[in-house]
């Protein structure tokens, strides 16, 4: 864990991330934080998000060709469903994950975290396709 000062900027970025369930990108977080701290730069938001990820407070959700999205790491162990059509990301709860056979892991590899991501088409996109 990095030792980062608990600045107003860090608190504002953390609050913006903590209070949304939309899995925002840095630009959205920047826009939200500027309501409280008008002079905060996008670079400061990116550096703060990087520190939050390093500290394990947030996780990234990365999609090829799209902006990195961020998710506040809550105490609940949730995972994500991603719509292949519109790119929306939804939280899902999985009670029991299937165990991974140790034969599929490199020798001596220790699992520290598991993130499950399922892909499909959300109901909104499915309804548009069927209309």
Image (cartoon, grey):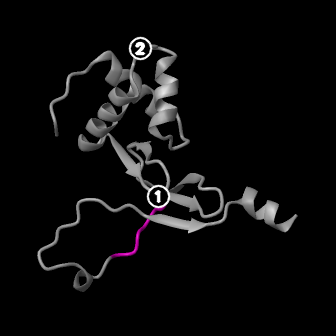
Figure quadrant of the N terminus? top left
Q: Position of residue 57 (x, y in %)?
A: 31, 39
Residue found farthest to the bottom: 103
Q: CA distance from mark 1 to mark 2?
A: 30 Å
Label 2: how many residues lie within 10 Å, few (<14), some (14-19) or many (20+)?
Answer: few
Q: Which residues are magenta?
A: 94-99
Q: Which residue is mark 1?
A: 63
Q: Is residue 115 above or below residue 74?
A: below
With 70 as the anchor, is 51 left or right in this view?
A: left
Asked if the residue at tag 2 contacts the one at tag 1, i.e. Cβ–Cβ closer than 8 Å, the answer is no
Figure quadrant of the C terminus? bottom right
Magenta stretch contains residue 97:
yes
Residue at 48%, 41% in the rendered image? 25
Label 1: how many residues lie within 10 Å, few (<14), some (14-19) or many (20+)?
Answer: few
Q: Which residue is mark 2?
A: 39
Residue at 38%, 43% in the rendered image? 73
Magenta-drawn stretch, dominant element (helix, strand or loop)? loop
With 109 as the anchor, is 70 left or right in this view?
A: right
Q: Nearer the viewer, residue 95 or 42?
A: 42
Quadrant of the image occupied by residue 58: top left
Q: Is residue 8 above or below residue 75?
A: above
Label 1 vs 2, first from the N-terminus: 2
Quadrant of the image occupied by residue 40: top left
Q: Is residue 112 above or below residue 16?
A: below
Q: Position of residue 61 (x, y in %)?
A: 43, 53
Q: Is residue 83 above or below residue 47?
A: below
Q: Check residue 110 in the rendering and tell me which mark sits there, or answer none.
A: none
Residue at 16%, 36% in the rendered image? 2
């Amino acid at each position: 864990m990095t030792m980062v000062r608990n600045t107003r900027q860090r608190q504002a970025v953390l609050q913006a991330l903590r209070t949304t369930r939309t899995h925002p990108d840095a630009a959205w977080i920047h826009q939200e934080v500027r309501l409280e701290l008008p002079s905060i730069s996008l670079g400061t938001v990116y550096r703060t998000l990087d520190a939050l990820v390093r500290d394990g407070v947030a996780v990234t959700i990365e999609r090829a060709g799209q902006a990195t999205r961020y998710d506040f790491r809550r105490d609940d162990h949730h995972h994500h469903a991603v719509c292949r059509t519109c790119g929306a990301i939804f939280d899902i709860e999985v009670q029991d994950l299937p165990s991974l056979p140790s034969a599929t892991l490199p020798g001596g590899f220790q699992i520290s975290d598991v993130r499950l991501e399922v892909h499909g088409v959300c109901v909104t996109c499915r309804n548009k396709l069927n209309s």
